[in-house]
Image (spheres, rainbow, N blue to C red):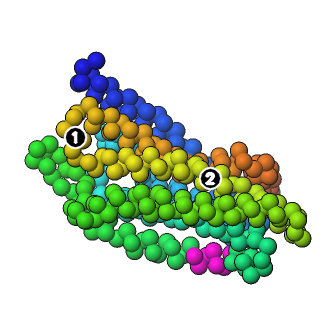
Amino acid sequence: MSSSSIITSLAFIGQQITIYCGISLLIAGTLGGFILTIVFLSLQVFRQSSCAFYLTIMSIVNIGQLLTGLLTRIMITGFSIDWTETSLFYCKFRLYFANVCAQTSSTCLCLAIIDQYFATSAHPRWQQWSNIKIAHRLITSFIIIWALCDIPYLIFYNQIYSTTTNKTSCVSTNTIFTQYRIYFNAPVIIGFLPVCIALFFAIMACLNVQRIAYRTVPLVRRELDKQLTSIVLVQIPCSIISIVPYAITNILTSNQNLMANQVIWAQIQFASSMSLLLFYSGFSTPFYVCILVSDRFRRQLMFVLTKIFCYRWSRRNEVAAAQIALEA
């Protein structure tokens, strides 16, 4: 095959994969995040759990990430529609909001596994740190921190018109901030740092869970701790798989020297598109991880879907029937 045909083929394959896989991830992730949030908010056992609270916030910000990051990526790569070129507000807001969501999601995963380490600890002093009030304060604090740290996205991202391509692009106008985003924010803050923290406390939580059967712990609390610990433990390798390729290709695409060879550059662009889909899959999977990992969660899901909503539907019908009877 000639170089031009290879480049064209890679671009076409990448476009088709982005359209079909991207739309599937968007629908599945948004629906799954919405259902997971409903389950956690509907059952009292989860509303009183600080770990479940972290997972609830993670589900909410994951939906925000998918709707701003993935949806825009599908429109750009799949349909050549770039809203950042037509709206200065969206040019600045999209990356700002998506980055806040990504950082908050990583933070929630770390806090969830740290919380389970405290909750399963044999020391009452450490167990006190697994507290819903502390969880509320930590999440509020971190959201404020990330919202403030990401303000440079609102400042330095602007629409720039290129006389060469006759197109307007949404790019960073500050070289230092661009280097920070590529070499520190994406690979460290969103990538390896939360993963390393989560891995360390995951190992500690596993050791605690193995010893929990030998301690006097209420059965409901013991089963809840095992359930939530298993969920967040499986979520960690899913996060590693989704983040590491993205961090690597993000650095490669910033290397302008690789653009000299068009075939290699096309291959890197294709790998970047695939790693982006893999990156967004990390925000789409938590609900399905819960279903696959926890039999208890599957029962809780069925209870919420069948009992609670059917009860509310029947109550609504009773109220409607009563109103009709009064009007008759």
Q: On the rendered image, what quadrant is the C terminus found in?
A: bottom right
Residue at point 72%, 48% (across, down):
293
The residue sitting at the bottom extreme is 125
Foreground residue among 50 and 251: 251
Can residue 86 be seen? no
Give whichever of 59, 4 is nearer the camera. 4
Q: CA distance from mark 2 to mark 1?
A: 36 Å
Q: Give the residue type that dot 1 points to.
A: Met
Circle 1 SS class: helix
- Identify the mark at residue 259; answer none if there is no mark: 1
> In screen coordinates, is 90 left or right of 174?
right
The amino acid type of the residue labelled 2 equals: Gln
Question: In the image, which residues are magenta?
Answer: 131-138
The mark closer to the camera, 2 or 1, is 1
Q: Position of residue 300 (x, y in %)?
A: 78, 53
Q: Which mark is residue 323?
A: none
Which SS class for mark 2?
A: helix
Give the mark nearest the N terminus, 2 or 1: 2
Question: Would residue 182 appear left or right of 58 to someone viewing this image?
Answer: left
Q: Which residue is mark 2?
A: 235
Residue drawn 69% across the image and 54% down it: 231
